[in-house]
Image: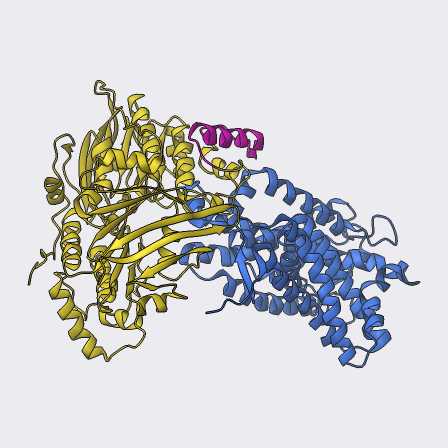
Amino acid sequence: MTETLLALDGLTKAYPGVIANRDVSFSIRRGGIHALLGENGAGKSTLVKTIYGLVRPDAGTMTLNGAPYMPADPGAARRAGVAMVFQHFSLFDAMTVAENIVLGMDQPPSPRAISAEVRRVSQLYGLPLDPARIVGDLSAGERQRVEIIRCLLQDPKLLIMDEPTSVLTPQEVDILFQTLRKLAAEGTAILYISHKLGEIAALCDEATVLRQGQVVATCDPRTTAPRAMAELMVGSVLQAPVRVARPEGAIALTLRGLTAPAPHRFGTALKGIDLSLRAGEVVGIGGVAGNGQDELVAALSGEMAVAADMVRLGDTAIGDAGVNARRAAGLLCGPEERLGHAAAPDMSLTENALLTGARRKDLARRGFVRWPAAKAFAQEIIAAFDVRTPGPEAAARSLSGGNLQKFVIGREILQNPRVLVVNQPTWGVDAAAAAAIRQALLTLADGGVAVIVISQDLDELMEVSDRFCALTDGRLSPSRPARGLTVDQIGLMLGGAHDLEVAHVGA
Amino acid sequence: MIRLEKRPQPSRGWSYAAPVLAVLLTMLLGGALFAALGQNPVVVIRTIFLDPLFSEFAWFYRPQLLIKGAPLVLIAVGLSFGFRAGIWNIGAEGQYIIGALVGAAVGLALYPLESRWVFVAMVVAGAFGGWAWAMIPGLLRVKFGTNEILVSLMLVYVAESLLAAMALGPLKNPEGMGFPGSRNLSQYPGAANLDLIAGTGLHWGVVAALIAVICAYVALARHIFGFQVRLAGQAPRAARFAGVRPARLVLVCMGLSGALAGLAGLFEVAGPAGQVTIDFNVGYGFTAIIVAFLGRLHPIGILAAGGLMALTYIGGGIAQSNLGLPAAAISLLQGMLLFCLLAVDMLTHYRVRLTMRKVA
């Protein structure tokens, strides 16, 4: 048996107009936890899809266990011992855990046998999971466990994890890491894709950095500074967000007893939210998605009307005002969902600039759209926020996630808000764009704008916030100064992770 | 192996070429159909598509094209706003009937007053009648969340019954020797919707259709209302985020399409049809749905599609009388047209790629 499990040699894959992977070579050790680092668009997905049999490379070879390896489809990859947990789960809400697992198998055994097997594996690896539960009732962390167990039942030699921690609480991340370490100790190799450098330093023992499709470095993340890895990824020196100290401003936004029923069956009711926000202040709101974030944003943007007194902008009660009245008053929002909510996918950037900018940018007079002015506004956003696009005529859907995010956040920032609310401002955005967006938010606050940042990324919240609150099940915790908060304290504020158990390592 | 790849942006070129290709495909498939019926396909296609325009009797058919096309275009333009916004008014036929009834009732009530204002009052009443009939499904949807497709469609049959009751009852011609049907409005100068230039078929309905096309074009391209309509159809959440109130949009779109359908009904009853009769409606309200989609919900496209549809009606009529084709064959041809358009439409959103089957 050799030390190397999987060796990649000279993998190249070109798509029309772009080379996704260029001469990529590295190897993964048996029992190693290998990080694959890179910005969005660096070629990480193409590479793992190649390994998992979803993409055929134009050139290059792979060797698994010393034998040539070139899977024609994911089924072949699974038979060869390669399993993958995707970032987006592919589970059916209405079925039980066991049924979901059976659905993904090539030769499914009987449901009874599978239940016993699920119980055995989940205990072995400290992943508590009841096979009879309906997936729709599970938390994001538990759903991920279903996916992991589905992979583990195949007894894989290589487990690929794509951005696994983006949906987890800190405590759930701990449990996941213990599971992964135990797997590695038993000889399973893990290819771990992420751009969260702290996690990689904590978990992985080897890292390959991709930039523009090429391997730019291989390093030991335990000894390389996260900043150095980030700079390898981006290829330039990163500017950490800079905060200028400033005096406390007047109260800009007050939420008093903000209460609203759940807007639909799977929504969350808002329960007595109190918060006041000063001009020039950044308040970070943390919490796992589905705890009322969307509803809070809707109540602030005006998409969901509440009692007038529950939301005050300065001295004016605006809780019952509509979307455009709030915009006119200076309360602007950037929702989480870029495509379909913040932007219309099939419309051009010019039209999308008009979407929220009509009022404050005076883009429509007596109902008639001033298209040249709208186009100029779109161009202003593109230039100011370095949005990579052929031009304002491009459809929103044709932009990458990060570029579109820069566009929709920039659109609100350039309208000179009094209060800006953003939900998940850097979700799925590469490191350089994320840093640019955070910096723009801080610059805005330095200019006297009150900013609310809602995010699941705690590192991000710690980086930008003056104060921190946690949103759990529609309730907002009292705020605490962000400086000096530890991850454990934050975890407790997030309501503690219920239903969690630390892995029984060595059981 | 043929593969379809989604284009990053819909192709501009194909969105213009698709309707033309669809018409050509329809001619081919329709030709095959007529050949199977034992006819010479070239002759039939020529009869349907060319004779109304270029034969020796074209002087008779050309005005008919305007008379048939105008209501189709007028109704389809109104429908296109709602269809773009995802509001499905299927009951334009009913709104067309009620518009005609209300407008004709006003004209008949004022008989025999001689003033051009009679016609103006009828036009206003016709638009109001269609608007009010469309408000029923609109308000029911907004207040109670009912499905406007079903309600507007069912109201067509209510409107048809009302039409029959009116033609036999209150609106019946008192000097009509007991025959069902109202006085002939086209013989009542104050109310008649006659040709503006004699013998051309160019009546006020044609003028109204052209004005509607121009207004719709300006609204969609330049006005914030048109933008909101497109936004609501493409991305409803983004529309709400942009401040579009869904309930208001439903009422405006239903009302607009109803009013234009009512207008079309009024122009028809005061002009080409002349009187309220039991079988006054001939399905313009339903055909207009096809016209709206054939014109890809774009005003200029609708104008062209309305013309094409009118052509198949007139040409189909000629083919029936001269070549003895069954009426169903003509309906089939019209259906093929929509079907081909939907099929060809795929090319604007997808690109076809021929790839070698890979060796597994």
Vertical side of B353 occupied by A172: above or below: above
A475 is within the stretch colored magenta:
no
Name the quadrant of the N terminus of chain A.
bottom left
Where on the picture, by quarter, is residue A319?
top left
Where on the picture, by quarter, is residue A191?
bottom left
Residue A272 location, x and y as percent?
A: 18, 42
Q: In the rendered view, does B319 fall on the left or right side of A396?
A: right
Instruction: Decide if residue B72 is in sight here.
Output: no
Q: Nearer the viewer, residue A208 or A314?
A: A208
Vertical side of A39 occupied by B186: above or below: below
Q: Nearer the viewer, residue B30 or A476?
A: B30
Residue B109 location, x and y as percent?
A: 69, 55
Instruction: Decide if residue A245 is in sight here.
Output: yes
At horizontal 11% and vertical 48% (from top left) the residue drawn is A496
Region of the chain picked out in magenta, as a range? A360-388
Chain coloured yellow here:
A
Residue farthest to the right? B56
Q: Colour of chain B?
A: blue
Q: Nearer the viewer, residue A136 or A312?
A: A136
Name the quadrant of the C terminus of chain A.
bottom left
The image shows a total of numbered marks equal to: 0
Please name the colour scheme applied to the rendered image. by chain
Where on the picture, by quarter, is residue B352?
bottom right
Q: In the rendered view, does A109 fall on the left or right side of A496?
A: right
At horizontal 45% and vertical 55% (from top left) the residue drawn is A59
Q: Nearer the viewer, residue A319 or B191?
A: A319
Residue farthest to the top? A247
Residue A219 location, x and y as percent?
A: 25, 42
Residue B14 location, x and y as percent?
A: 64, 53
A364 is within the stretch colored magenta:
yes
